[in-house]
Image (cartoon, grey):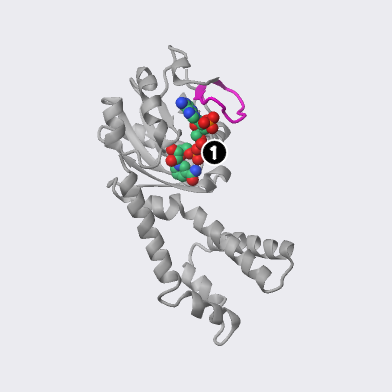
């Protein structure tokens, strides 16, 4: 029997970067005996059973939720093997580009929720946007939200098509921020700073600014930017370059558009 407050039994399929980050969050909340399917799972603490293949899940296991965290190209291989466990379970997929309709076609009448997390989930600071497919009950949606919230903040959309833009902004977004740190570091070295100092300045400027943004819920990013910008000063000189129409405004818009279109093209 599920103990009060514990997360009900989970069948987690795929325990790599994302799956293990989620799992650790669930364990911190109290997780009923659950099963992990992964040929090389991360080192996880009990209570759970680890198997290398979905065909090896104990036949009597009755998960309340099946979380799909394998690479999208594994779906055709994995889904037939989990069908025997879908009876009363909701399927929560975080696979990029695998649509609710596409999954439902492989899973029959199973209730499907699709979600797009991002890598800060690894430290409980992710943001995930989810969309519920037809037939998902309120309690199932709440369970999905609880599991996703273990890795950070959650939001829901009714229109699945919006997940393409979500993928472009927050799913891929950490890469853009890490690129900023890389470019700042390289530019600092070009200006003569020693490489270790350049690295420290770039990393702490990006992470510290993110933390300041996070600690300032009543201020928008623009006002925090303006607070660093004195008329005629150094920041204004740099922003004159970055904020020129052909610079960041155009390239960020084009980048998000390219990623959104790629997400649309990959959807199946
Ligand atoms: N990383 C991101 O930024 C991000 C963001 C949003 C969504 N996602 C989605 O999250 C999903 C997982 O991404 P990830 O970054 O966590 O990938 P990952 O680290 O490669 O994790 C996938 C795991 O699945 C395992 N696996 C392979 N074949 C399997 C099978 N037949 N049955 C069960 N497990 C199997 C892999 O094992 P092996 O390594 O041994 O093959 C690996 O441990 C993907 O669908 C991705 O689209 C990722």
Q: In the image, is 16 to the left or to the right of 161?
A: right
Above or below, 153 relative to 44: below
Above or below, 160 relative to 261: above
Pick the quarter of the image with the C terminus: top left
Q: Which residue lies furthest to the bottom in this view?
A: 232
Q: Circle 1 sits in a helix, a strand or a loop, which is it?
A: helix
Residue indicated by mark 1:
17
Residue 38 forms part of the magenta stretch: yes
The secondary structure that most of the magenta stretch takes on is loop
For the point 51% across and 53% down, the residue is: 174
Q: Residue furthest top?
A: 60
x%, y% of residue 264?
A: 31, 48
x%, y% of residue 202?
A: 64, 63
Q: What is the span of residues highlighted in magenta in the rendered image?
A: 32-49
Residue 123 visible in the current orientation: yes
x%, y% of residue 101?
A: 26, 35
Asked where in the image residue 69 lies, by quadrant, the reply is top left
For the residue pair 94 and 208, the one nearer the viewer reads as: 94
For the point 60% across and 23% down, the residue is: 46
User: Ligand 1 near label 1 (Cβ, under 8 Å)?
Assistant: yes
x%, y% of residue 29?
A: 54, 34
Asked where in the image residue 232 lies, by quadrant, the reply is bottom right
For the point 46% across and 36% down, the residue is: 147
Above or below, 216 relative to 230: above
For the residue pair 21 and 8, the one nearer the viewer reads as: 21
Residue 33 visible in the current orientation: no
Crowdedness near tag 1: few (<14), some (14–19) or many (≥20) residues, C-alpha within 10 Å: some
Residue 181 forms part of the magenta stretch: no
């Amino acid at each position: 029997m599920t103990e009060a407050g514990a997360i009900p039994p989970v069948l987690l399929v795929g325990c790599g970067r994302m799956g293990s980050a989620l799992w650790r969050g669930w364990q911190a909340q109290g997780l009923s005996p659950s099963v992990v399917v992964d040929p090389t799972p991360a080192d996880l603490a009990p209570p759970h059973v680890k198997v290398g293949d979905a065909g090896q899940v104990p036949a009597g296991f009755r998960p309340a939720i099946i979380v799909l965290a394998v690479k999208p190209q594994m779906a055709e291989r994995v889904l037939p093997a989990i069908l025997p466990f879908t009876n009363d379970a909701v399927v929560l997929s975080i696979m990029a580009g695998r649509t609710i309709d596409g999954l439902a076609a492989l899973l029959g009448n199973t209730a499907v929720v699709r979600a797009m997390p991002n890598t800060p989930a690894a430290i409980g600071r992710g943001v995930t946007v989810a969309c519920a497919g037809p037939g998902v009950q309120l309690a199932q949606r709440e369970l999905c939200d609880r599991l996703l919230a273990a890795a950070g903040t959650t939001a829901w959309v009714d229109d699945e098509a919006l997940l393409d833009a979500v993928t472009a902004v927050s799913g891929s977004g950490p890469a853009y921020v890490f690129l900023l740190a890389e470019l700042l570091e390289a530019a600092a070295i070009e200006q003569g700073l020693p490489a270790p100092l350049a690295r420290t300045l770039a990393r702490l400027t990006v992470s510290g600014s993110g933390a300041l943004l996070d600690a300032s819920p009543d201020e928008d990013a623009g006002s925090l930017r303006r607070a660093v910008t004195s008329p005629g000063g150094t920041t204004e000189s740099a922003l004159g370059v970055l904020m020129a129409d052909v610079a960041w405004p155009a390239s960020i818009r084009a980048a998000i558009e390219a990623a959104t279109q790629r997400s649309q093209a990959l959807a199946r």
